[in-house]
Image (spheres, rainbow, N blue to C red):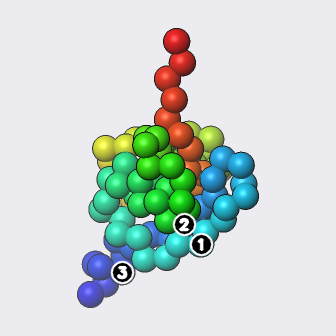
Amino acid sequence: MSNLVSTLVSLSVHDVTGSIILEKDNIQGSLPVSSVASSLASEMQLPQNVPWGLRNDQTSEFLDDEKPINEQIESGTSVTVTPKTHLG
């Protein structure tokens, strides 16, 4: 049972405007960031026709979409749900 507990992640989440803030517990840490970002964006009622990513607020680094979230951040980290845009 301790294995399951160690794979859960808690996050403080906000959108890029800072107007929507969520405290999320018990996120499965083995999920890829792309799945977590999509789920959070949906819960925040952000547009679903936009690809979303997560940025670590402490380091300003964007998390790798394909890697599990618990391999990139610690539980309790604050992240921003941000649209993925490609300019030019």
Above or below residue 17? Residue 20 is: below
Q: Position of residue 20 (x, y in %)?
A: 67, 61
Sequence-wise, which precedes: disc 1 or disc 3?
A: 3
Mark linked to residue 12: none
Report which residue position mark 1 lands on. Answer: 23
Q: CA distance from mark 1 to mark 3?
A: 18 Å
The residue identified by callout 3 is 5
Q: Badges 1 and 2: C-beta atoms under 8 Å apart?
A: yes
Three-letter code, disc 1: Glu
Do the residues bearing badges 2 and 3 touch, measured as CB atoms within 8 Å? Answer: no
Name the kind of residue labelled 3 in the image. Val
Q: Amino acid at mark 2?
A: Leu
Q: Quadrant of the N terminus?
A: bottom left
Q: Nearer the viewer, residue 14 or 19?
A: 19
Residue 74 lies, with reference to residue 80, above or below; the image says: below
Labels 1, 2: front one: 1
User: Tag 1, which secondary structure?
Assistant: strand
Question: Which label was assigned to residue 11?
Answer: 2
Q: Badge 3: how crowded within 10 Å, few (<14), some, or many (20+)?
A: few
Q: Is 9 displayed left or right of 78 in the figure? A: left
Earlier-in-chain disc, 1 versus 2:
2
**Quarter-wise, where is residue 87 in the image?**
top right
* Residue 15 against residue 22 in the figure, above or below: above
